Image (cartoon, rainbow, N blue to C red):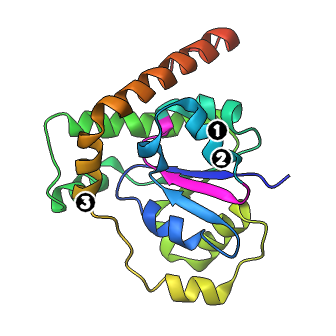
């Protein structure tokens, strides 16, 4: 079985760069695919495709659904301090009174995943190191690390335009919220069935 993978992190944690690094040979790694989801079946459909992964910054609150929707899915956590994330977002012109709390809550979810799931956890600042990228590459993909590929892509400053992402999320807000409510209900159902604590 060729297992899918997800890379989870906060915004501004090089998840877009990783999505390009992990798009290799027959494999495709999406980025922020969750924004296109309108139901949980969409997630299942996406990750049921062969040779598929995704790098996501909004999936952490729903991590309990990953083994349900995509059994055997591999999980990579990219950890960047919240203050660094907020500074980077501010340089992109993105700020707000609720943003620090949102980012701290999202980071707490990454802590939760690290404690309870089998993951590969990587510090954001170490993504400049080839051996760290090698570990991610070989954890996610069924190939030995490709030094030439890493050498080429490591020189690229690959970033999404955050303003475009936000514009999309605002435009599709009702649909995204509907899918989020479905995911919350499913998560609560799983927690109740397994008697997991809420934190």
- Where does residue 79 sit, x and y in percent of width and height? 47, 52
Decide which of tag 1 and tag 3 comes sooner along the chain.
1
Q: Residue at the location (29% across, 56% down)?
A: 84
Residue 44: numbered disc: 1
Query: Magenta stretch: residue 92 in it?
Result: no
Q: Are marks 2 and 1 in contact (CB under 8 Å)?
A: yes
Please rate how many residues cluster around mark 1, counting C-alpha atoms within 10 Å: few if below 14, some from 14 to 19, many from 20. some
Give above or below for 171 relative to 78.
Answer: above
Residue in the foreground of this view, choosing between 10 and 116:
10
Q: Which residue is mark 2?
A: 47
Which mark is nearer the camera, 1 or 3? 1
**Among numbered discs 2 and 3, the one appearing first in the sequence:** 2
The kind of secondary structure element at disc 3 is: helix
Q: Which residue is mark 3?
A: 88
Magenta residue check for 58: yes
Answer few, some or many: residues within 10 Å of disc 2's Cα (few below 14, many 20 plus, some between 14 and 19): many
Question: Residue at (15%, 47%) from the top-left corner?
Answer: 95
Is residue 134 or residue 153 the one in the foreground?
153
- Which residues are the magenta region? 50-60
| Picture quadrant of residue 164 | bottom left
User: Is 60 above or below relative to 127?
Assistant: above
Left or right: residue 144 versus residue 81 is right
Residue 57, how many percent across, how many down? 43, 47
Determine the residue positioned at 29% across, 43% down. 169
Q: Nearer the viewer, residue 169 or 151?
A: 169
- What is the distance, in whole Å, between disc 1 and disc 3 at their CAs? 32 Å
User: Mark 2 or mark 3, which is nearer to you?
Assistant: 2
For residue 49, above or below residue 103: below
Mark 2: secondary structure: helix
From the viewer's perspective, tell me whether residue 176 is left or right of residue 67: left
Please, is residue 83 above or below residue 151 in the view?
above
| Callout 1–callout 3 Cβ contact below 8 Å | no
């Amino acid at each position: 079985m060729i297992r899918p993978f997800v890379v989870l992190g906060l915004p501004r944690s090089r998840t877009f760069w990783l999505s390009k690094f992990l798009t290799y040979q027959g494999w495709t790694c999406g980025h922020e695919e969750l924004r296109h989801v309108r139901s949980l079946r969409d997630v299942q459909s996406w990750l049921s495709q062969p040779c598929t992964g995704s790098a996501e910054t909004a999936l952490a609150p729903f991590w309990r659904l990953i083994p349900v929707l995509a059994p055997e899915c591999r999980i990579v956590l990219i950890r960047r301090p919240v203050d660094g994330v907020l500074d980077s977002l501010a340089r992109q012109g993105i700020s707000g009174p609720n943003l620090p709390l949102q980012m701290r809550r999202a980071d707490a979810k990454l802590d939760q995943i690290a404690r309870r799931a089998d993951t590969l956890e990587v510090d954001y600042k170490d993504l400049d190191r080839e051996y760290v990228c090698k570990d991610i590459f070989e954890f996610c993909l069924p190939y030995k690390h490709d030094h030439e590929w890493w050498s080429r892509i490591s020189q690229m400053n690959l970033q999404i335009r955050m303003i475009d992402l936000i514009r999309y999320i605002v435009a599709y807000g009702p649909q995204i919220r509907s899918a989020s409510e479905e995911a919350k209900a499913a998560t609560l159902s799983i927690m109740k069935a397994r008697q997991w604590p809420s934190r």
